[in-house]
Amino acid sequence: MKTIYKITFFIAIMAMLASCKKDELLDGSQAKSRANALEKEFKTQLHNSKDGWVLFITTTNPDIKTAVPLILKFDTALNKVSVKSIYGNEDRTTYFNISAATGMPLFSFATGSIISDIYEIGGTNVTDYFFKVLSVSKDVIELQSYRKGTASASEGGAIFRMVKNENLPWVKDWEQETIKLFAQTRFFGFYLNAEMTYASGDVFTPARVYFLNQSAGNVTFLKANYPTISNNKTVDAVTFGYAPPVGAAQTPLAMMGYNSIFYESTLSFTPASLFSTGPQALMKLFKTNYFLIRKINTSSIDVFALDKDGKEIITGKISL
Amino acid sequence: MKNIYLMVLAVMFIASTFITGCKKDDEIVVEELIDYTAVKKGPWNGLDSLTDTIFKNYGVRVYYEFNPRVIDPTTFYVPPQYDKAKLYTKYVVEKLWLEPLKKNFPMFFNNQKPIEFLILGTYVHFNSISSGTAAGAGLNGQFYRLGMGGADKIAYTKAGLRDHMNTLFHEHAHQLDQKFGRGYLYDRVSQGTYYQLNYLRKPDNTTRTDNDAQLDGFFTPYGGFAPEEDFATSVESMIRYSKAQIQTIVAKNPKLANKYQMVYKFYLDKGIDLHQMHDILNQVASTLPL
C-alpha cells in the first residue's frame, strides 16, 4: 500500500511539472502559413533556374544501376512544363499544377506528360504523377510520389531529388549531336560490337548487338498504342538485337529518341520477347535501361549513362 | 507516514486545479481549416476557358486534369494529352453531345445530363481492376458524373468521333439504368439465355458475330453478356444504326424486338427519340471542321 502511495505521489508531481507551458515547444506558426511559404518558395525556385531542373528517374529493376535524367523547364506564369529527355526535346505541351496536400504542396503533372507515360509503362519509381514537395532549396528540391503505385499500398512513394540544371558537364555532352541516329541507315542490319566501361570497375565482355527496323505493321501499332512512342514524336521504334555467346538470342523492342537509345519492360503488351523478357535481358547485360548519345561517328556511336546523382557510370562505344 | 502522503496528495490535487486552471491563453487560436482537396488553379489556358464556357452554357463541368478531389486516391488513371483533351472537349463534349441535346431534346438535356464529365487519357484502374477505353461502369455507375477513357487514342476524324458517340451513349445508358432501373420485365425477356463470360465465342469455339447474337435476341455479343450490357448495347445500337436498319435487326428475334420497344420507350419517356438523335449525330458529325 505504501509503495502505491509513493508511486502515485511521484507520478502526480511529474504530471504537474510536465503539464505547464507546453505551447512553447511549437514555433507558433500555423500549418497553413507554413504550407503557403513552402509553396511560394517552390514556385520561386522553379522559376529561378534558367535551364530548369533535372529529375532522375530510378527504376525498380535491381539490374539497372543508372537513372534516366529529365530536364524540366517550368514556366510558372503559364503553368507549363517542357521536358528535354531521352523521349524528346521540349516538343510537347504539358501543364502542371500546384495545390494543397496534407501539410505540404502537391505538385502534379496535370495533363498527359512524359511522367504519365512512364507511369503507365511501369517498372520505375514514378508511381504517380502527383508529387509531394518535401523540401525546397536553391539547388535541390525533394519530391515524393504521392502514392506507392498499387491501390492497396500506403501513401508515399519513392523520394526523388531534383537538382538545378547548372554547370552539369554531361548536359553539354548530350546536347552536342545534331543528327538523328534513326536516320543513319549504315548502322542498321549489321552486327555491331558493343564495348562498355563501368565506373564501378565491373568488367564487360564485348557483346554482339544489332539494330533492325520494326515492321510497318508494328510501327503503326506502336505509334497508336505504346505510350512512350505514341505521345512522343521524336521517338522511333527499332529492334535492339543481342546475340549472346550462350543462350537464346534476344530481339527486344528499343526506342531511338532525342540523342538516345532506350528500352522499357512492360507487361501490358505481348510478346514478352519484344516487350518484357527481351528488354530485361538488355538491362541485365548493360546494367542500364538507356544510353545517351555523345557522338555519332562514321563507324561508331559514343554512348554514356548516368546514375541517380548525375555521375557518368557507363561509357561505351557501339561500332560497326 | 501514510497520512502524510495522503495529505500531500490531497493538497496537490487541490493545488493542481488552481495551477492548471489559471493562465489560460488570452484568446484561443482556432486555426483556419485547410481544404486539402481544394483545386488550386493557376492562370487559365485555352482549354480552361473552353471548359468554363461549356459550364456556363450547359451546366456541365469538364475535367481534363485531376487531383484527389476529382477521383479518390485509390483509383488510378492516366491524364489526357492537352491537345487531345482540347479536341475532345470542343467536338465530342460540346458539338456532338451537349449542343444537339440542348437544342433538340431540352427535357432530356435538363434532367438526365451529368454535371461533371471526366476525360481520361487512356485507361482507368479501379483498385486492381483495369477497365478498357470506355472507362466502364465502375466510373459511370454514378449519376452526376460521366467519364470517358481513351481520349488519347480516338481518331479525331468525322468518322472516328461519330463512332465514339455510340460508346458515349452506351456509357450514359448505364447511368440511366442505375438511376431509373431498366425494369423487372426487361430482365425477364431474355432471362436464362445470357451468354455470361462466354459472350465472345460460340459453344463450338468460333467467334460470335453480331448476327449470331441478334438471332439469339441481343444487338451485339457483348449485349448477351448480362442484362445491364443488353440495355446499354441497345442504346448504343440505336445511336449507331438508322431506324430502318434497327427494324431489320429486331425482326430477327421477337425477344429482341420486345426489348427494343422497351428501351426505345424508356428513352422516349425521358424526352429523347434515339432514332432522331442518330440522324442528328450523322448530320452534325459530317459538318465538323476535321
Image (spheres, coloured by chain):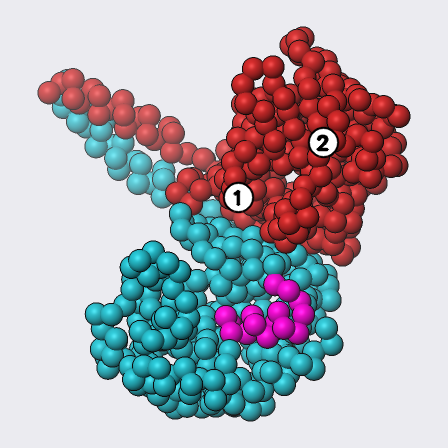
Chain colours: A red, B cyan
Residues drawn in magenta: B154-168
Task: Please say whether residue A3 is visible from this viewpoint.
Answer: yes
Q: Nearer the viewer, residue A302 or A111?
A: A302
Q: Main secondary structure of the magenta part?
A: helix
- Chain under disc 2: A
Splitting the image into 4 quarters, where does residue B122 fall? bottom right
Splitting the image into 4 quarters, where does residue B46 fall? bottom right
> Residue B78 in the image: x percent, y percent?
56, 52
Q: Nearer the viewer, residue B176 or A291?
A: A291
Tell me what residue is drawn at x 27 percent, y 22 percent: A10
Splitting the image into 4 quarters, where does residue B150 fall? bottom right
Lower sequence index among marks 2 and 1: 2
Say whether residue B83 is magenta. no
Q: Give the quarter of the figure containing the C terminus of chain B.
A: bottom right
Say whether residue B163 is magenta. yes
> Which amino acid, by three-letter code, is at mark 1?
Phe
Residue labelled with disc 2: A211
Query: In terms of secondary structure, where does tag 2 sit?
Result: strand
Q: Give the quarter of the figure containing the N terminus of chain B.
A: top left
Count of all numbered marks drawn on residues in the image? 2
Tell me what residue is drawn at x 65 percent, y 59 percent: B41
Which mark identifies residue A269? 1
Tell me what residue is drawn at x 71 percent, y 64 percent: B44
